Amino acid sequence: EQSEQAIVFFEKAFSLKRQCNATLGVLPSNLCEAYISIGNYNKALSYSQVALKVNSEKNGENHECTLKSHDMVARVKMLKGDYKGALLDYEYILNKKRNEMNSDESEAKTLINIGCAYRKIGDYTL
């Protein structure tokens, strides 16, 4: 119920910001998380893709915030059962992190997500 109330306000704010061409900031990410919490993965995916676009345009493809947004897209794909799509996203993220010299911890998290995607796909070959 709280998530649904939050969505109402987030959606109103999103609409107003779009109307006046204001910066969306973290609003698409907040909407994604709220929709995940109520199980509406289609809406969550839509807003995660908006967040990715906003961060990519603002910060560039290799920025940490952009990679976190891309991770959110992959996470929603996993929740929707699109394991191969999520795997492609996670592999893309991993390559970006390796090229940008991100922390080992950040890389480890992505490797764990890749392992989870392979497990869901049922591909256990090495």
Image: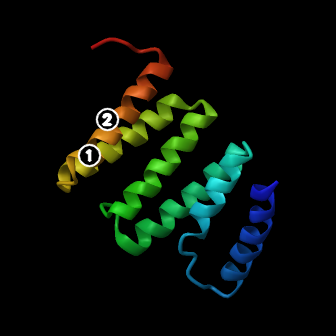
Q: Quadrant of residue 65?
A: bottom left
Instruction: Find disc 1 in the rendering and name its residue.
Output: 105
Q: Is residue 12 left or right of residue 44?
A: right
First reached walking from the N terminus: tag 1 or tag 2: 1
Q: In the rendered structure, are the residues bearing label 1 and label 2 in contact, judged by CB atoms less than 8 Å apart?
A: no
Colour scheme of the picture: rainbow
Query: Could you tell me which residue is drawn at 41 percent across and 74 percent down?
Result: 58
Where is residue 70? Give x, y as percent: 44, 52
Element on which disc 2 rests = helix
Instruction: Find disc 2 in the rendering and name its residue.
Output: 111
Is the residue 20 above or below the residue 118 in the image? below
Query: Could you tell me which residue is drawn at 42 percent across and 33 percent down?
Result: 87
Farthest bottom residue?
A: 20
Q: CA distance from mark 1 to mark 2?
A: 10 Å
Q: Is residue 64 left or right of residue 56?
A: left
Mark 2 residue crowding within 10 angstroms, few (<14) / some (14–19) / many (20+)? some
Q: Quadrant of residue 26?
A: bottom right
Q: Quadrant of residue 4?
A: bottom right
Mark 1 residue crowding within 10 angstroms, few (<14) / some (14–19) / many (20+)? few
Q: Nearer the viewer, mark 1 or mark 2?
A: 1
Quarter of the image where the C terminus is located: top left
Farthest top residue?
A: 125
Where is residue 92? Give x, y as percent: 34, 44
Query: Could you tell me which residue is drawn at 60 percent across and 30 percent down?
Result: 81
Where is residue 123? Give x, y as percent: 41, 15
Query: Could you tell me which residue is drawn at 40 percent across and 35 percent down?
Result: 113
Where is residue 78? Give x, y as percent: 54, 35
Amino acid beneath label 2: Leu
How many marks the image carries: the answer is 2
Element on which disc 1 rests = helix
Quarter of the image where the N terminus is located: bottom right
